[in-house]
Amino acid sequence: MDWRERITIEPGKRSGKLCVRGTRITVADILSYLAGGETEDSLLAEFPQLSREDIRAALAYAADSERHTKLLAAE
């Protein structure tokens, strides 16, 4: 999945955080709910403007971000 099709960043929206296109729901919000034990179904019920593809785009972004994270060894 290309998360860029569903995730946007707009300087004036939610302080420039990554959001699901057409909403004010941030990627961090979605990831936090999932990390806290919420299910996709509960997120979809709580936020009817989201789709499963939006949730998967947030996860795809997180995975892509992790792949590009480099750890620096402490000196």
Image (spheres, rainbow, N blue to C red):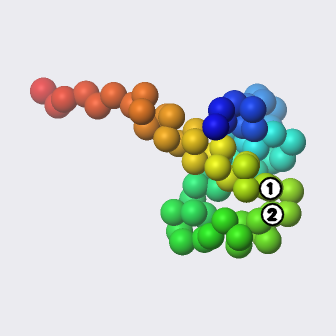
Query: Dot 1 surroundings within 10 Å: few (below 14), some, or many (20 or more)?
Result: some
Using the image, determine if residue 6 lies above or below residue 25.
Answer: above
- Quarter of the image for residue 11 reads top right
Residue 66 percent coordinates (x, y): 43, 37
Using the image, determine if residue 27 lies above or below residue 73.
Answer: below
Q: Are marks 1 and 2 in contact (CB under 8 Å)?
A: yes
The amino acid type of the residue labelled 2 equals: Phe
- Quarter of the image for residue 29 reads bottom right
Q: How many marks?
A: 2
- Quarter of the image for residue 6 reads top right
Q: Residue furthest front?
A: 1
The quadrant of the image that shows the N terminus is top right
Residue 34 percent coordinates (x, y): 57, 63
The quadrant of the image that shows the C terminus is top left
Residue identified by numbered label 1? 50
Using the image, determine if residue 53 lies above or below residue 65.
Answer: below
Disc sitting over residue 59 in the figure = none
